[in-house]
Image (spheres, grey):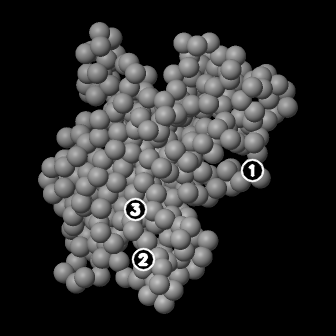
Amino acid sequence: MLLVQQINRPLSANGVSFIPALRTLPLSFPIRSRRVHTAPRRPYKVEIGVSFAGKPALDAHQLPKKKTIAFPRDHPIAQWRNNLLKWENKRLRSMSAGEDFFYVSQSINHSGVSLGIADGVGGWSEDGVDPSLFSQALMYFASKHASSSWAGEPDFDPIEGTSAPGKTEKSLSPVEIMSMAYQDVLNEPSIECGEDVTWHLLLSKPMPSVGSSTACIVNIDAQSGKLSAANLGDSSFSILRSSSIFHEQKPQTHYFNCPRQLAKLLPTQRPHLRITDRPEHADTFSAQLRHEDLVILSTDGLGDNVHPGEVLALASLLRRGTADQPGVNFSQIFADKLAEYAVVCMHSYDKISPFELAARDEGFKHVGGVSNNHF
């Protein structure tokens, strides 16, 4: 799953554009806050590209022993999810984001954007739980909190003499958004934590509150150009600046191939399965963005198969190829091409993948790419 943002700062004071390359999210859908305000011109503009590709279908012998249940079509989360999956400019043909999901939300008064990705932990399918439900629910609630908050300090309203649109709306940090969304998932009324999994299967009820996922949330302030981020688990983000990697967020793991994760578990589960982390365990980062910076959010399907140097090389190649196309959405092109290349690497046994190198360091043998939920 890929989200790409690029920042362009023209000579005039009117615009910087961020282009995030994220594995999952589109920003072409309407986003509304609770009140309508006249938005001032912001010196920074965010341009977003989204791309994703679900992993190949499993063979019959690979399917989980228990049937998993998805959200009903009329469920609010399902409707929100389906709207995002129709990302308008996405060229890579895939209508599934696998077990991962994302969100893109515009902050109050066009003060900035907030983006997030979550990687559902696949092992839950063996218990009859769809791993995508938790990640979708987490991103759904995160988007609601992000869209009702400011990206930075609230604008001052000279008429009312207070911060517009009111004292109850404020800026939220990525950790705060993650924490509030996680609490919403824990409080999800459709599932009681103490209920038995089999009972939900018999009733064909989805279980969004049972499961776990990683989480990565990035806020960009369109007034100051400041990026703030929180990452928990092995999803990640990076910033490309000029011809170098300005920042690459390190993954968080408990041990090899076991990322830190937010979870909701049943009381009956065995203690050694209770790998639960908290939003406050997330690593945080902030930076001042510059003209033409590229911000990439991705789940581990990218990092396990594509080396950072390859990402940088592809960005440079596409820059040169689109230099004479001023109206092109570079972030979308980059997100699609990066996702396509990750899929190719996933099926390659000739190339030494980042996952192969990491496995070798831990004493495991693995050859080539590795299949993940999506890119």
Please name the residue that numbered disc 3 is placed on.
48
> Which residue is outermost to the bottom?
159
Going 76% across and 45% down the picture, which residue do you hit? 72
Q: Comparing marks 1 and 2, which lies closer to the viewer?
A: 2
Q: What amino acid is found at the position of numbered circle 2 in the picture?
A: Asp
* Residue 158 screen position, x and y as percent: 44, 87
53 relative to 288 in the view: left or right: right
Mark 3 neighbour class, 10 Å CA radius: few under 14, some 14 to 19, many 20 or more: many
Say above or below: 41 vs 365: below
The reply to whether the C-beta atoms of the residues labelled 3 and 1 are less than 8 Å apart is no
**Amino acid under disc 3:** Ile
Between the C-alphas of marks 1 and 2, the distance is: 35 Å
Q: Quadrant of the C terminus?
A: top left
Q: Residues within 10 Å of mark 2 (few under 14, many from 20)?
A: some
Instruction: Write down the quadrant of residue 6 in the picture.
Output: bottom left
Relative vertical location of residue 162 with respect to residue 272 in this rendering, above or below = below
* Residue 127 horizontal/vertical position (percent): 67, 21
- Left or right of residue 90, residue 67 in this image: right
Q: Please tell me the numbered disc located at residue 165.
A: none
Q: Which quarter of the rendered picture does the N terminus lie within?
A: top left
Q: Which mark is residue 75?
A: 1
Q: Residue beneath label 2, please?
A: 155
| Mark found first going from the N terminus, 3 or 2 | 3
